[in-house]
Image (cartoon, rainbow, N blue to C red):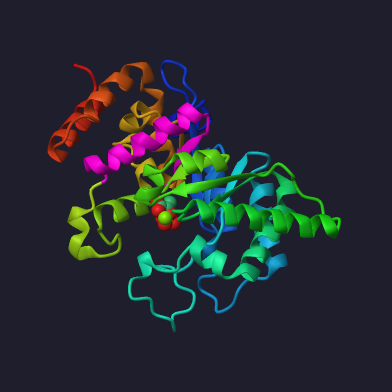
Amino acid sequence: ERSKLKRLKTAESETLDGVKIELLANIELPEDVDAALEAGAQGVGLFRTEFLFLNRGDMPDEDEQFEAYRKVLKGMDGRPVTIRTFDLGADKALDTSRHSTNPALGRRAIRLSLSEPKMFQVQLRALLRASRYGRLKILVPMLAHASEIDATLAALAQAKASLREKKIPFDEAVAIGGMIEIPAAALAINMFLKRLDFLSIGTNDLIQYTLAIDRADEEVSHLYDPLHPAVTMLMAHTLASGEKAGVPVSVCGELAGDSSLTRLLLGMGLRQFSMHPAQILEVKQQVLKSDVSELTPLVRRILRLEEPGKIREAVERLNAPPT
Ligand code: PEP
Ligand code: MG
């Protein structure tokens, strides 16, 4: 049994018809790199940097952040590492003295970073300084407006200029991408494709905002349905648009780690999955026994279904071994 597990860990992640699938880890602290490597992750698809803030009263300064980012990049030893800028606010509040009437719709994530330019510059400089130690990609959470993307790119250019001035080296070509987690972003995807190097679908928030279900409210959790046709429609549209434009799209929400949905996602065109390290081998098992050319037309038909119950049944059939 153990040698079987070991073989699974080292097996190349590709489908029966030879399509390579990237399985990446979501991490919250630099220490999580060990678990990611242990699970055979091919990189880090999401480092939630706001966890550097939580459980402490103040902000980590530039050097402290630089050390944390460098540790992850060095630990992943040349594998791609996607680090997300702070997603503070809402459920990850820093300043609890200020109460937004509706925190999930308030000044969180990129909105907060753009309204605190000094804090944002500190993080961007720390990220750029760390970029020499591996393959860094910077990911921006909660984008909804083209102007937010443009302001973020301008902030990054400013951070680069300040490092150049001080002759501090960094990777000039560091990639910058955006989270697709607000329905508006998925619907107006072209403005993202034009401006960014890659996209990552955050299904946790995308479901929350599409269905108007607070992801942390147990009273409505029975309505939080990843297979609601509106959700699959937005995901499929994002994946197809990325493919057409030649912009890579990953999924880094909890959906990517749900092995009962792996085949659905493969059939939708997903090739990069980022998840909690504990899910990687289970998802890999699904990948190894799937055939993308077989799944693609089946999933196209599933995506035309309108009843959640029918969709769920069809997804279950997709997973059932052929009789
Ligand atoms: C998401 O929204 O799916 C996501 C990956 O981000 P977080 O869970 O940190 O909000
Ligand atoms: Mg999110």
Q: Where is residue 27 drawn, in percent x and y?
A: 51, 53
Of the pair 61 and 114, the residue shown nearer to us:
114
Q: Where is residue 271 drawn, in percent x and y?
A: 45, 30
Quadrant of the rendered structure where residue 232 is? top left
- Name the residue at the bottom extreme: 97
- The answer to whether residue 227 is visible is no
Q: Residue at x 54, y 52 (%)?
A: 149
Q: Residue at x 84, y 58 (%)?
A: 165
Of the pair 262 and 101, the residue shown nearer to us:
101
Quarter of the image with the C terminus is: top left
Q: Quadrant of ligand 2?
A: bottom left
Q: Residue at x 22, y 18 (%)?
A: 322
Quadrant of the rendered structure where residue 205 is? bottom left
Residue 21 drawn above or below residue 38: above
Q: Which residues are magenta?
A: 226-252
Q: Where is residue 74 drawn, in percent x and y?
A: 69, 48
Quick check: is 108 in the magenta stretch? no
